[in-house]
Amino acid sequence: MAKIKKMIKTIKINADKCNGCRTCEVVCSAFHSKPAFSSINPAAARIHVTTHRLKDIWLPVFAGEYTPAECNGRDQYIIDGKQYDECSFCRAACPSRDLFKEPDTGLPLKCDMCEGQEKPLCVEWCLNDVLTFEEREEEVDEQIEQTELEAGLNALIDRYGLESIGTTVARIAQRD
Ligand code: SF4
Ligand code: SF4
């Protein structure tokens, strides 16, 4: 596979500093509402803070890839004496939960690093410095990344079947 230079964007998480205020979820959902900043719905955010007050667990996780199948088994992790289910760290929009899915349609959501913004808004608005934005150039294998539209179409195909989606699109195209 050919190698290309690519700007890799990451957000480092220091969960020890998180207090579960959920500002990151609020600002993410506001930025991605249409038009931008017209509404707030943390259920539609591309970041989720796993919270367990009694166990002192606050863990921000960013939405990653869509997956059509759930895992067969889930491990438990003990970190600093706190017990976490494997799903707490998982970034996938998967069939086993509602997380990282658009609440009205169920279509998968993925963190896009606030495309078009100089800096991710969750990083900017987290006043506890939990999130740190980093950019670096790396040589990586050239591969076609799945767009949000493709992930959404894949989810629709998994739900309704390719044939049904194809016929519906053809019917709509004829109408226009
Ligand atoms: S804004 Fe920062 S402190 Fe608040 S929940 Fe998000 S990551 Fe945690
Ligand atoms: S970087 Fe932007 S899209 Fe990603 S979780 Fe943060 S606010 Fe949402």
Image (cartoon, rainbow, N blue to C red):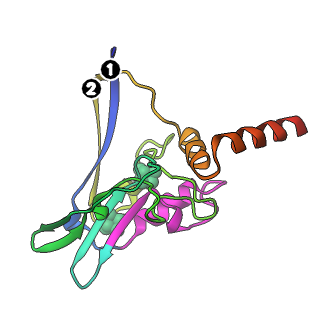
Q: How many marks?
A: 2
- Does residue 1 sit above or below 133 in this rendering? above
Q: Residue at image x 15%, y 74%?
A: 82
Vertically, is 107 above or below 51? above
Mark 1 vs mark 2, CA separation in Å: 6 Å
Which region shows up in magenta?
Answer: 21-50
Disc 1 residue type? Answer: Lys
Establish if 167 lies above or below 33. Answer: above
Residue at point 39% right, 63% down? 48
Image spot of residue 167 (x, y percent): 77, 40
- Residue sitting nearer the eye, 155 or 112: 155
Local SS, label 1 = strand
**Can you tell me whether the CB of the residue at mark 2 lies under 8 Å from the nearest atom of ligand 2?**
no
Looking at this view, name the residue that lies furthest to the right: 175
| Image quarter (top left, top right, bottom left or bottom right) of the C terminus | top right
Give the side of residue 65 with respect to residue 33, left or right.
left
- The local crowd at label 1, few if under 14, some if 14 to 19, many if 20 or more residues have their Cα within 10 Å, is few
For the residues labelled 1 and 2, say whether their Cβ atoms are less than 8 Å apart. yes
Q: Label 2 belongs to which residue?
A: 138
- Residue 127 appears in the rendering: no
Q: Is residue 94 left or right of residue 133?
A: right
For mark 1, what is the residue?
5
For label 2, the crowd category at 10 Å Cα-Cα, with few meaning under 14, some 14 to 19 and many 20 or more, is few
Q: Please tell me in which quadrant of the rendered image residue 71 appears.
A: bottom left
Q: Amino acid at mark 2?
A: Glu
**Image quadrant in which the N terminus is located:** top left
